[in-house]
Structures are given as C-alpha cells and as structure tokens.
Image: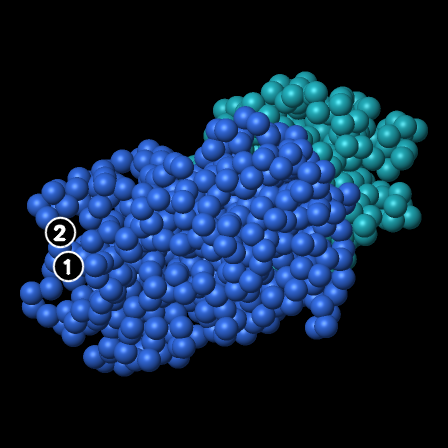
Amino acid sequence: MPRPGAVIEVDRNTPPVLFHFGEGVRLERLPLGSRIVYPPDPLEPIAHPERAIKRALGKPLEDDPLKSLLRRGMKLTIAFDDLSLPLPPMAAPDVRQLVMEEVIDMAAEVGIEDIHLIAALGLHRRMTEDEIRHIVGERIFSTFWPDRLYQHDGEDPELNVYIGKTAQGEEVTLHKRAAESDLVVYVNLTLVPMDGGHKSMSTGLASYRGIRAHHNAKTLLGSRSYMNPPDSALHHSCIRQGQLIEDTVRVFHIETTVNNHAFPAIANFMQKRETDWTAQDQAMFLGMKQLTDLAPTAFKRNIFHAMRAPYGLTGVHAGQVDAVHDKTLEAVRNQLSVRVEGQTDIVTMGVPYLGPYNVNSPMNPILVACMGVGYLFNFYRNKPVLRKGGVLILTHPCRYEFDAVQHPSYIDYYDEVLADTRDPFEIEQKYEQRFAEDPWFRQLYRKSHAYHGVHPHYAWIWAAHGIDHAGDIIIVGGEREVVHRLGFKAATTLEDAFEMAEQTVGRHPSVTHMRMPPIMLADVE
Amino acid sequence: MLKLGDVDEPELPTREWVRVMPTLSGICGSDLAAIGGHASLYLDPLTSYPFVPGHEVVGTLEDGSRVVIEPALGCKVRGIEPPCPRCAEGRPGLCYNVTEGPIEVGLQTGYCADTGGGWGEVLVAHPSQLHQVPDALSDEAAVLIEPFACCVHAALRGGASKEDIVVVSGAGTIGLLTIAAVKLFTPPRRLIAIAKHPTQRDLAKKLGADQVISPSEVFQRIRFATGAKRLDGMNRSLLLGGADVTFECVGRADALNDAVRFTREGGTVVAVGMPGEEKVDWAPIWQRELTVMGAYAYGAEPKKKGKRTFQLALEAAPELHLETLTGPTFGLGEYRDAIAYAMSAGKLGAVKVAFDLRGLKI
C-alpha cells in the first residue's frame, strides 16, 4: 500500500531537504518548526493497461460502447494531447499510443478508412517528428504520418471554423476536420487536475479567437485555483465552450491518468523523502550535484531532458466527457492530494528544469515565473498554502536564456513588455494583440517549432494569481537583473531569503516547504 | 604624429579673416581616427600638414563676442568666384575647390595647415564661418553645435517621414545628437537607438529615442518593432522588412553590415559616423535596392528654405541641454589623458571630451 502524502515538522534530527534548482539540485536546512509537505508515493499501476483500455472502451461511462459508434464509411478523427504533458515525458510506450492503437484496431475491424489523427496542440509549438513518434508509437506514425497524422494549426485560415458563441459571449472555434467528422475520439493524458475534460477540445483544437475567451487575466485571477476545476473560472469557460462543441460534433472522450513515478532509477532520490534515502540514493545525489555544479549548462540540460519517467497507468475512462472527467479528477486527486492544515507566512519551493512549455529547451525567465508562481503555487484546493500577503521563496538560477526556435516571442515579451509593465491588464490592452497578430511569430508557429506569438502572455498571466496573492516573491540563486525584471526579489542563499522575508511577514514566521516534484495537490484546511 | 608645442600663430590669409581664441574645443571621433591611424587614407590628399586639430570650436573674437566655427573651407571661405556647383547649392562640405585660394588644401578648419585649429590658442576664420552664440547657450553646449549641425544635416538628408521606423545605430556624440535631430526635424513613427553603454542608453532615452536596444539584440528587437521576418544566415541574420531609415553613426564594419541587413528593402541607410576602410558586404545593398547616402558636414538646407544648418542647430540647441553631454574637459597640457579618455568615452560614461582653453592667456 503506497504511503499517502505527509506533512513533517522539522526538528533537530530532520536531514536537509532537497530543493530543485533548474538543472541542478540543492540540499537546504530549514528552520526548526518548519513544515515539509511530501507528495504521496506512486499509486500501484494497473497491471494490464491494454485490458483496462479495452474494458473502458467496451463499457464507457454514460455513452455507448465505442464499437457501436463506429461504422464503415464514416469520417473518424482521433485527437490527442501534445508533449506538454506528462512531465517528464513518459517512457515508451506512451499510454496515448496504447489507447490510439486500440481505437484504430477497432475502426479497422469495421472497415473505416477515413481516419485522421490530429495532435491537439492549441497554440503550443509544433512537435518534431521524433516527438510525435514518441507519443503515437512507430506503428501509427509509419502508417499515418504525414497525410493523416498531423498537428493542429490554430492560424490556418482554411482549417479553423467558427462554430458559435456561448451564452456568455465566448467565441468557439474548432479544427475543420474535427468539426466535419462523424465522430471525434479525444485521447487524453491527465497529469494534473487542470488538464482534460472540456478543456481538451476547447483549447487543443481551437484558434486564438476561441482560446482568448478564457486565457486572459480576468479569468485567470478568477481561478482559485486552476488546479481545482470547480473553483476555476478558466474551466467554467472551457465547459461552456465544450458544450457548444459537443452540440456540433459527436465526441467520445478517453482520459487516462498515471501515477507520480516521475523520475527514472538514475534520479530515484528525487522520488523519495530524504529520511528514506539509502546510501545509494545519497551517492546518486552527490554524483548529480557534482555533475550539475560543474558541467556546462547545455550538457546537463541534455541529460535532464533525456530523462523518461516510468509512469504507471492508474486509470482509463471513456465515454461522455463530464462523466469521464469526474472519474479522471478522482483518480488524479487520489494520487496527488495531501492534507495540509492551515496556511503559512512563507512557502518555499524548488523550481525544476522542466515545465509544460520547455520540453527540450531552457526554462526562460517567463517560464520560471509560470512554473513557480503559476503551476507550483496553484497546486492547492480550498486556499493556497501561502497566506495572503505571505512570501513565496523559489530556487532557480533564472538566467537570461531563451530558445530562439521555440520561444522567439518570449524574448520580445521579456525585453520589451516586462520592461514597460508587468500588469496583466495593461499588457492585454497595450501588447496582446500585437504579439498575437505578428506575422513572423505566426509563421514561426505554423512552419517552425515556435510557440504562438501570444503564448508568453499566457505564461505570464498563469502566474497572475500567485503574484497578486503573495506579498513578496523571492528567487534564490537567480540572476539579479532578470529576477528584478520579473518584479521579484533576488537572494543569494535561502538564509538570506528568510531574512528578507521577515521584513514582509515579521519575525519568527511559519514556513512550509512544498517538496515538489513529484507533484502534489495541497488540500488546505 | 601628434605633439604639443609652440608654433607660429596662423597668419590672416586676407584682410577679411579674423582671429578666434578658442575657449572649448571638442575631441571628435575623426580626430581620434586620425591620431590612432584608423582614418581612411582617402582623406590624406584632402589635408595639408602640419595642422592644428580641432574643428568643434567655441571661441571668442577680439571684441569679446562668442562664436562657434563652421569649419568647412568651401569657395566662399577661399574667396573663389564664381563658386563651384556644390558650393552654389549651399554644400561647402562638397566643395571642388579645396585645393585653391589663399589657404592650403583642407576640407575643414582643423585639417588645414593655414587656419590653425581649436586645439591651439588662436585660429583664423573667414567671417562666413562665424556664428554668434546666444547668451543662453553655455560654452559647454556651444561646443556641440558643430557635431549637432552635422546631425541635423543627416536627419534632413535621411528625410524620414512620420510613418517611418527609424534606427540610429550608435550612441556616441554623433549618435545621440542624431537622435535629437531626427526627433526635432523629421519625427518618425518610432525611433530605435542602438546603444552599447549604460550612460549612452540613458541619454538616448532622454534625447527622444522611443526604444533603446543593445548591439547584440538588433535583429530580435528591430524585427519585432517593424513586424519584419528574420532569417538567420551562416554569419549573421537579416530581416525581410525592417527599418525604413537607418542612421549609421558608428562607422565600423559590424555596425554597417548589420545596418544594411536590418534596413528594409528599398530603405535608406545614412552614413553619419565617419567610416574608415571597412569591409562591408555589398550584396544586401544590391539585392535590397538600398539607398546608401553619406551625410557630411552642413551648409544650407533646401528642405528648410535654404537656412544654414548651423542656424538650425543653434536655434534648436537650448531646449536640448547639450551642456550635459560635455565633459570632462582637459587642459592642452593634459592632451595624452584627454585623448585616452576620449577613446574610452562610452565605457567611462562620457560623451564629449573637450579641451578647455579658457585659462590660457595670449
């Protein structure tokens, strides 16, 4: 029986605790009386994923069995999530591959020939062929690529259709092929509660016109948090859009969940609590620390990005989207939830090398904010672990470093927009349209491997709630000028950061360290 | 070779000429190039030796009035009638007759053996070279009128429209004054300055740049500002589209090669900073059908109804607070320090290093 998550109080016997630090790791001692919140151990995976998939497709939730929906001569589209999850990427075979192979086999049995597979990447970057091959597997790739397996293009004027407005006036667009299909099968992998459900179709196969309805500062600030869909304006909007999509096209949802076995054997110590570290784990930590302290950045980045996670499948549900997603969220919460009593004055977190938008590239400063103050901060239900006006302390080298291929618009956003203002509403007024409509960003998104021009704005507003909530945000180990550009404070050491934090929250503050990743969801009472 | 010593006072070439006692005299990039041996040999036959350098001059006449010198030694200064076609157009910097008349060959005061220069106690000037300095303008501001006039001329030559995106490359004296001149005389939709050093960046903003970028980010930032496309070649990037008008105020190969790649097809590159013999790839100039034009000196500006450039500069100067750009100043005896300082001015946070001759008695 895997252990649930735990909250440990630091005493004299507590060993130093692990902090992620970009492409590096640190051990830090926390003040006595601090709390360390550990994620639950990985749940036992399903022993036979293929059988579980067949079962889910044969006995779906509030829907007919998939087989009964398939008929010869129909136009079938399979849409699937892109590489923004899971993180790190899943060791082969990716669970999406297993699901899609089963769906395609079923379709082949009834003689369906018109099958298209679309990577539902929304405004994310196009994947490379290798990255797509990794998700779908060699068999599907060699059969369908590139004519019948391709990537969504939210800027193709011919291939995005406007399908209407919700009662709240949110515009909805959809990939033309999906809109004209007799059946869309959506194959999802939900790692965190933000993913899946109606959000899959309403962002993954949409254009900027549709996505801007909920990817905006007002909606994000109204999502407390976006990791808890019932309290998330983002998800309410996606649900409204999704319902309109379901009125337009028949959709059969398949959602999968995995456990939080996020690190391979080489980094097993990251998976464990420090009190459980064996001599081998300690040796591995020291080895990695030496390597990451001394090795050139590009070298260690290659090592980290080559890591594949040995996730195990914990659930597969199919059928009607709401019914499926309820089960999915339940499975995700079973894996991620940790009960935490009360808020604290200071929360510390290590920001790792990887977030959803920097697979195979450096985590640039905007993405550091997105990851630390956005995603990691928002892993809560009910209320944040950090009290209102408290201090969030993150560890990350936070360098001025951008990938010109993946993140060209991020460079201008950082250099130009954040030099002018950090206010998300002002940015929306002054800059969003320019970034969204810049022809060169559009071309790079469509033809190269660049995130959409507007994407840095989304990454920035993903942190808006955290920035609004925290009295101060301190980044330990970051380049001072870069940290200041983000509007945060820079500290050289964690001790310095605690001293600085006392100016905001007073002496003898309460401290909680969220020992992520592996990720967890704090149920704060 | 540069040396400090006593030389005979320059003789008045004709009775019209007058003596001018310099009070402040700037050290120009062209002076530094000549001293450092980087100046183009093209200029050698257009110069007479030995000469006293210094062409950015504010000084006093024998009646005590303050003047700035317009250094170009064209037909009028040389007493040549009728004037050559270029001088007749009001462009004495392009005079055909710089080898004629009562003085030795030379394009400017400060490069002519017979006129003396600002780095000496006395120079001689033709009355047509003299411009009265208004009381409101300090010596420290007035010493920048000559380079400012060059920049006003460049701005008018470039002829940016209010729809244009203009880039000023370089933020030394010429770059900064070009920013000011463009903003005053041909205000564009957006002016982007390329500045290397922190003080230059601050001053570029103060003088009106809408955006200041560093040399390492020109393609990234100009691309975004102009909505162009960027292609990365084997040695450097280029833009499809780009700036409408670029004022190149550095004069070195790197900056010139960048300028012809980030200026849009059919656009204009104005060479304002004095270049030497630089290796520049002409393929972009050819393929992009760029108009590359020099902007040398001053004269009478046809776009301003023939008004003298120096007058335009003098009228515009007070609101610019040019005195903040001048300093430190050095005595002539400290010329080695002065020149060393001027050579590193940008790094040291200075703009116009000058000789202060106000304590000298004739």
Q: Is residue B332 left or right of residue B113?
A: left
Tags 1 and 2 on a common chain:
yes
Q: Is residue B257 left or right of residue A36?
A: right
Label ID, residue A306: none
Q: Secondary structure at mark 2?
A: loop
Q: Note the chain letter of the cyan one.
A: B
Chain A, colour shown: blue
Q: CA distance from mark 1 to mark 2?
A: 12 Å
At x 26%, y 61%, the residue is A40
Label ID, residue A16: 1
* Residue marked by disc 2: A277
Tag 1 and tag 2, C-beta contact below 8 Å: no
Amino acid on which the number 2 mark rests in the picture: Trp
| Residue B180 in picture, x, y percent from top left | 69, 52
B294 or A184: nearer the eye? A184
A164 or A37: nearer the eye? A164
| Residue B93 in picture, x, y percent from top left | 77, 33
